[in-house]
Image (tube, rainbow, N blue to C red):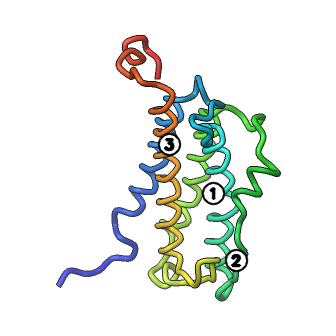
Amino acid sequence: MAEKRIPDPTLMARLQLSVKGVDWAASLVAHKQHEQPGGEWSAHQHLVHLLAVEREVYQPRVMAMLEQERPVFQPWGAEAFMAERYTKREGGVIELAERFMREREKLVEVFKSLTPDEWARTGSWPDGEVDVAWAAERALAHGLEHFTGLLFVHQELEHFHARQWANGQQ
């Protein structure tokens, strides 16, 4: 029987590739970064949120789970963050994507160093008790959700992609 590996051997690659997708998608919408198609979030809002969640939720919670016994985490209010702390002065979407990539790499380096026992450490998120492996998968899913959100913005704002490519825009 094949030995089971913790974590899934492709998880680290997926975590790293997911941020490359965010970087690429940000480049597609940089010239319209503050436009909000259909009243939904702009590309800029997606990236400010993504960076904040990486820094204020995933990184500190993973570290707390590794350093403390079953820490309990309070909900992080995405809506409150956007209402109270969002600003267009955070930088452009290309810069925000680069900052997100650097922050995600920090988390990936932590994950790469973990033992099987550390992957199994737990904490109580607002959704209930979870382990570090769940947090890694959730961080991956969150990045992919906003990658998809950026592509949605691009799809809604730009209907003729081949013309953009021909003109050297991305």
Give the labeled residue for mark 3: 22
Residue appearing at x 67%, y 45% in the figure? 48
Disc 2 to disc 3: CB gap under 8 Å: no
Q: Horizontal and vertical percent for residue 25?
A: 48, 36
Q: Quadrant of residue 89?
A: top right
Q: Secondary structure at mark 2?
A: loop
Gap between marks 2 and 3 measured at Cα: 27 Å
Q: Nearer the viewer, residue 14 or 85?
A: 85
Q: Is residue 15 left or right of residue 54?
A: left
Three-letter code for the amino acid on which mark 2 is drawn: Phe
Tell which residue pokes out farthest to the top in this image: 167
Q: How many marks?
A: 3
Could you tell me the amino acid type at mark 3? Answer: Val
Q: Image quadrant for the N terminus?
A: bottom left
Query: Residue 54, labelled with which disc?
Result: 1
Which residue shows up at 70% across the image and 71% down it? 75
Q: Earlier in the sequence, mark 2 or mark 3?
A: 3
Identify the residue at horizontal 58%, vertical 23% (top origin).
Answer: 31
Q: Is residue 155 left or right of residue 57?
A: left
| Local secondary structure at mark 1 | helix
The image shows residue 156, relative to residue 140, as above or below, that is: above
Q: Amino acid at mark 1?
A: Glu
- Residue 67 spot, x, y in % from top left: 67, 80
Q: Position of residue 26 (x, y in %)?
A: 53, 35
Residue farthest front in this picture: 38
Dot in front, 2 or 1? 2
Q: Which mark is residue 73?
A: 2
Q: Marks 1 and 3: in contact by CB < 8 Å?
A: no
